[in-house]
Image: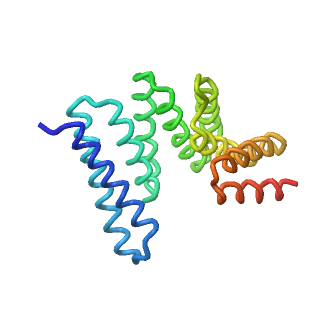
Amino acid sequence: MRSAREAAALIGKAWALRREALTGASGPEAELEVIGQVRGHLVEAVAICRETGDAPGLVVALGKLGHVESDAGRHEAARACYEEAVTLAREGGDPARLAHALRHLGDVHRRAGRLRESHACYAEALSLYDGTDTGPPPLEYANTVRPMAILKEALGETEAARGFWRRARDLYRAGGIDAGVAECEERLARLG
C-alpha cells in the first residue's frame, strides 16, 4: 500500500519541477512536457492521499493541482480542486490551510468574473488570518490582502482598494519582497 510519505514526496517533486519550468529558459514544448509531468505527479499524490485517508495531505495536493490546472487554463478543474480543498480544510479545522485554499478559490472566482464569490472567499480568508493568536504568516497574509485590493479596484471601491494596497505594500516591505512593494506602489500611484 502506498503511503502519505510517498504522496508528500510526489508533491515536493512536482513543485520543484514546476518551479524549474517557470524559471527555466526551455521552449514551450519542453515546458508543456514538464507541466504534464507535474500534473501527473500531483494527480497521483491526490490518489494516494485519498487511498490513505490523509486529509491534510489531500488539501495540499489539491491546492497544488489547482495551481497547475489554472496555469494550463483549465479553470473549472482548478475551481473543483480548490472547492474540495476548502471543504476538507474546513472539516479538518485548520484555519491556515483553509485561509490559503480560500484565497486561491477567490482568485479563480475573480478571474472568472464571479466577484461576489471572490469577495466572500477573500473576506473569510482575511478573517481567519486576523483571528490567529500568533498573527498570520506575513507573506501569506500579504498574498491575501493583494487580491482583495485587486478586487476592490474592479468593484470601483477606490478608497478601500487604496487601503488594501497600503497594507499589502507594508507587509511585502516587512518581508523583503521588493517585487510586491513595487507592484503596490505602482497601483497606489495609478489610483492617485
Q: Is residue 64 left or right of residue 111?
A: left
Residue 22 against residue 119 in the figure, above or below: below
Pick out the residue farthest to the right: 192
Q: How is the image coloured?
A: rainbow
x, y (%) of residue 144? 61, 41
Quadrant of the frame with the N terminus: top left
Residue 21 against residue 138 in the figure, above or below: below
x, y (%) of residue 31? 38, 70
x 44%, y 21%: residue: 93
Q: Is residue 21 left or right of residue 98?
A: left
Q: Is residue 186 left or right of residue 59?
A: right
x, y (%) of residue 176? 64, 53
Taking depth in this image into account, of 114 and 11 the one nearest to the observer is 11
x 83%, y 58%: residue: 189
Residue 62 against residue 14 in the figure, above or below: above
Q: Is residue 59 left or right of residue 108?
A: left
x 46%, y 32%: residue: 86
